[in-house]
Image: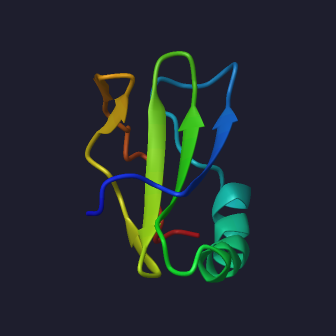
Amino acid sequence: MKEGIDWTTSRYLRTSTRKTPFSPSDIAGFREFVPHIHWRLKGKPYGAVVVAPASIDAALWEENALRLPLALNVDGTAMFPTRFTNWDEQ
């Protein structure tokens, strides 16, 4: 995976279960938005993060393919996504 992302969206959930997933409406929005933003970014990586008090989940689109990162580097601290989102179910 390339280092660095040119564009990221994020959403904060004040109340959440311990395993934070992207919502079905997030996923539906990604299906519409990611091809457009990929075109705007000229194929550069696009990432999305959902954040809750105790956990995060993350996704990365690189070369129009969904990738699920194993960890995110946030100010030198490794944060591990829950990977709880069921991308196939939507």
| Vertical arrangement, residue 87 with respect to residue 65, above or below | above
Residue nearest the viewer, comparing 13 with 35: 35
Q: Quadrant of the N terminus?
A: bottom left
Residue sitting at x 31%, y 33%: 80
Residue sitting at x 35%, y 57%: 68
Q: Quadrant of the C terminus?
A: bottom right
Find residue 43 and report its horizontal and vertical position in percent: 50, 79
| Vertical arrangement, residue 47 with respect to residue 79, above or below | below
Q: Is residue 80 left or right of residue 25?
A: left
User: Please, which colouring scheme is shown?
Assistant: rainbow
Find residue 57 and report its horizontal and vertical position in percent: 46, 41
Residue nearest the viewer, comparing 7 with 64: 7
Hey, which quadrant is residue 32 in on the image?
bottom right
Counting labels gives 0
Find residue 89 and report its horizontal and vertical position in percent: 52, 69
Hey, which quadrant is residue 14 in on the image?
top right
Residue sitting at x 45%, y 25%: 55
Hey, which quadrant is residue 62 in on the image?
bottom left
Q: Is residue 24 left or right of residue 83?
A: right
Find residue 47 and report its horizontal and vertical position in percent: 51, 56
| Vertical arrangement, residue 66 with respect to residue 3, above or below | below
Q: Is residue 74 left or right of residue 90?
A: left
Residue sitting at x 63%, y 83%: 39
